[in-house]
């Protein structure tokens, strides 16, 4: 008998590429009703993006940042997780920085030549699906991972498997995946063989004038401290997304200690051309 994967492939195989969250998404399903599954995954991603895009005036996040309150179960889930990470990272991962995130993205897009110079403090309250805040929120450090997670759920089914990849974040891969080099060459840094969620963050992805999308409010600094950070996380892609961003913002020694201490997390940090891995990272690497 063939492997389970080969049996699925004989039943059906489908994939889609599309834009979401200002990046390229790829969805693949193998098995029964694969084509319908990838269509459902794309529809899920599109629906969530329309609710979570802080730069879309009609989205739930825009309404929250404009009016200070919104009732939306997805926003509430993401904000609740964001507050948890705010506490667990001692404020390095900070969803209270919506103004900073807006101004920084405008700079990176070339719409502005001014960088944010100050960081904000504020309060957020969550009651079931209702979120209230007195400061604009930055949920982008979680939204893409959340969308990947929810889209991947759409692929689940009897006699079917699949995965979702979006701009360096992915659900547990169904095969081997390459870690992209931050140096502009085609040779991958490593080949992963893992059933954990994956996320990559780094200065090379979105950069202008030596500044990228990463910031650390506790140090009042802008920009990733490393060329690249790749994490694998047991919990979900939202956690991988958040912790890759957190490690990118921390100095090397602090990033290493943080990653080692976090249960269900392994990381590869590229700093000044040197590879730094947590003690269990190589277990997720092919032929380690």
Image (tube, grey):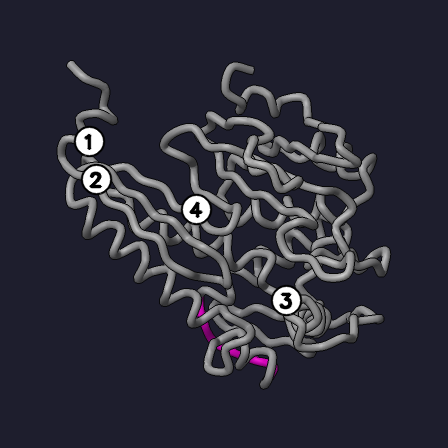
Image x and y of residue 118, in percent: 83, 71
Image x and y of residue 137, in percent: 64, 70
Query: Residue at 27% across / 51% down in the picture?
Result: 38
Query: Residue at 67% across / 35% down in the picture?
Result: 262
Q: Which residues are magenta?
A: 68-73
The residue that label 3 is drawn on is 138
- Please say if the residues under marks 3 and 2 sit with CB atoms less than 8 Å apart: no
Residue nearest the viewer, comparing 265 with 69: 265
Q: Secondary structure at mark 4?
A: strand
The residue that label 2 is drawn on is 13
- Please say if the residues under marks 4 and 3 sit with CB atoms less than 8 Å apart: no
The residue that label 1 is drawn on is 8
User: Mark 3 vs mark 2: which is more N-terminal?
Assistant: 2
The residue that label 4 is drawn on is 165
- Please say if the residues under marks 4 and 1 sit with CB atoms less than 8 Å apart: no
Residue nearest the viewer, comparing 152 with 122: 152
């Amino acid at each position: 008998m063939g492997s389970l994967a080969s049996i699925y492939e004989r039943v059906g195989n489908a994939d889609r590429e599309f834009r979401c969250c200002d990046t390229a998404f790829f969805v693949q399903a193998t098995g029964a009703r694969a084509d319908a599954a990838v269509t459902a995954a794309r529809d899920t991603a599109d629906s969530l993006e329309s609710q979570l895009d802080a730069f879309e005036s009609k989205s739930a996040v825009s309404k929250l940042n404009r009016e200070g309150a919104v009732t939306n179960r997805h926003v509430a889930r993401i904000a609740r997780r964001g507050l948890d990470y705010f506490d667990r990272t001692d404020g390095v991962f900070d969803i209270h920085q919506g103004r900073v995130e807006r101004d920084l993205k405008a700079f990176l897009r070339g719409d502005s030549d001014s960088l944010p110079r100050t960081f904000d403090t504020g309060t957020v309250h969550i009651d079931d699906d209702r979120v209230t805040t007195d400061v604009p929120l930055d949920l982008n450090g979680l939204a893409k991972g959340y969308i990947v997670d929810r889209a991947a759920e759409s692929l689940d089914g009897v006699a079917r498997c699949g995965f979702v990849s979006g701009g360096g974040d992915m659900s547990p891969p169904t095969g081997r995946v390459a870690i992209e080099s931050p140096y502009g060459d085609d040779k991958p840094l490593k080949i992963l063989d893992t059933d954990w969620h994956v996320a990559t963050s780094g200065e090379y992805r979105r950069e202008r004038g030596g500044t990228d999308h990463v910031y650390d409010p506790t140090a009042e600094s802008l920009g990733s401290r490393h060329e690249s950070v790749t994490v694998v996380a047991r919990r979900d892609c939202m956690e991988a997304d958040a912790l890759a961003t957190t490690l990118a913002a921390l100095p090397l020694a602090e990033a290493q200690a943080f990653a080692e201490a976090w249960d269900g997390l392994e990381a590869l940090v590229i700093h000044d051309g040197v590879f730094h891995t947590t003690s269990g990272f190589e277990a997720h690497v092919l032929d380690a």
